[in-house]
Image (cartoon, grey):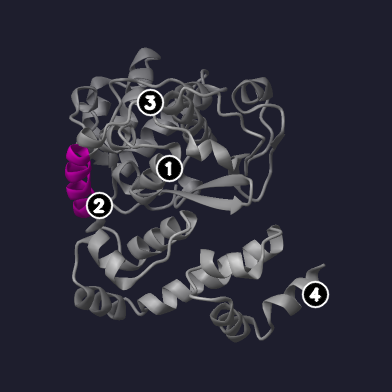
Amino acid sequence: MPAIDSSATVSAAAAVDLVELCLRYGLISDAELSALGADSVLQATPDQRIAESSYIALWDRLAQSKHAAGLGLRIGQTINPNAKGLLASWVSQTTTLGEALSVFIEHIALMNPSECWEVERHQDRCVLCFSLRHEEAYPNMAVERSMSAMLAWAKLLSGHEFPITKASFTFTKPSYIDAFYSVFGTDICFSSGQNSLEFDASLLDLPVMSGNHFLKSIIQEKAKSAWKAIGSGVSLTEQIQRQITSELDAGRGVSVMSLSDQLNISRQTLYRQLKQEGTSFQTMYDEARKQRALDQLKRNNISIQALSLELGFKDSSSFYKAFKRWYGISPKDYLESIL
């Protein structure tokens, strides 16, 4: 298994189901749980954390057991009231599924810093992509759990069936394919270039039934404090990359001021730390917009004006100049070249 940063941690709530199953199936002893620092998981507070290496070790125990087939899917489809960490509590108080998803993606480090979710918007549909920073360290069932849990939470929060039009997975087709059909529907692609869920974009407008503005403000304050503390173990570059991606996913522009406020640091500190890490806000923002511009032009029937606004340019002319600088060709000429 590749080396995992010894300081990396995940929410103890994420490990509750794993510990319960390992104990139920006799896959781990109390002494081994204690050695992993996971012996108190079942009595953990919402803000308690365990080492990511211990979390992966629990997954490995389950993956190697005779109960492994389809287990990740079953874990993901079961919402455990005893496994509700700060992030799940925060998401549960949002107003719409779109807001819930934005909060989840932007603050995923509260649950597991190795998880990465991105939303690709294609007019009337969305593609939600999932990856793990240490994917080679995790068994496939961990991916199955995350993907199926995302769908289960969407259904729980909205009270809607939330149909998936297509699901894709990077691993090969498993023997228990029927279990995938029952969760994701029949349009499933394995050995794909990415893990993703595709659905109608209008579903993100569905209201969250449990949403409460007052409770959200209380939980948000506590969650952001915890998120800031966790962020101290992640480079500022990585934090800002996540923020830029999240803002662009939501169709919002990004500024140094907004990032500084979200990260609770001054603009001067942001500039200085990024310089120490060998980059700058403008470089990162341009790189994110550069790649997204190409992706959108390749995949969407989107107007140049709409794309300009989506990427935070004040007008089409500014976008044309940037695109020509990036690729040495105008957006119009690029579109004609790929038709």
- Residue 209 bears which disc, if any? 3
Q: Position of residue 239 (x, y in %)?
A: 33, 61
Residue at (23, 63) in percent of width and height: 261
- Which mark lies nearer to you, 3 or 1? 3
Q: Is residue 89 above or below residue 82?
A: below
Whether residue 23 appears in this view of the structure is yes
The amino acid type found where label 1 is placed reads Leu
- Residue 7 bears which disc, if any? 2
Mark 2 and 4 residues: CB-CB less than 8 Å, in contact? no
221 falls in the magenta region: yes
Q: Which residue is mark 1?
A: 101
- Which mark lies nearer to you, 1 or 2? 1
Q: Which residue is mark 4?
A: 337
Residue at (55, 47) in percent of width and height: 129
Q: Position of residue 286 (x, y in %)?
A: 48, 75
Whether residue 68 appears in this view of the structure is no
Q: CA distance from mark 4 to mark 3?
A: 47 Å
The amino acid type found where label 4 is placed reads Ser
Q: CA distance from mark 3 to mark 1?
A: 15 Å
The amino acid type found where label 3 is placed reads Met
Nearer the observer, 158 or 242? 158
Within 10 angstroms of label 4, few (less than 14), some, or many (20 or more) residues? Answer: few
Q: Position of residue 44 (x, y in %)?
A: 19, 28
Say what secondary structure mark 3 lies in.
Answer: loop
Residue at (22, 48) in percent of width and height: 224
Q: Is residue 33 above or below residue 246?
A: above
Nearer the observer, 12 or 292? 292
Q: CA distance from mark 2 to mark 4?
A: 48 Å
Q: Quadrant of residue 216?
A: top left
- Magenta residue span: 217-230
Say what secondary structure mark 1 lies in.
Answer: helix
Say what secondary structure mark 4 lies in.
Answer: helix
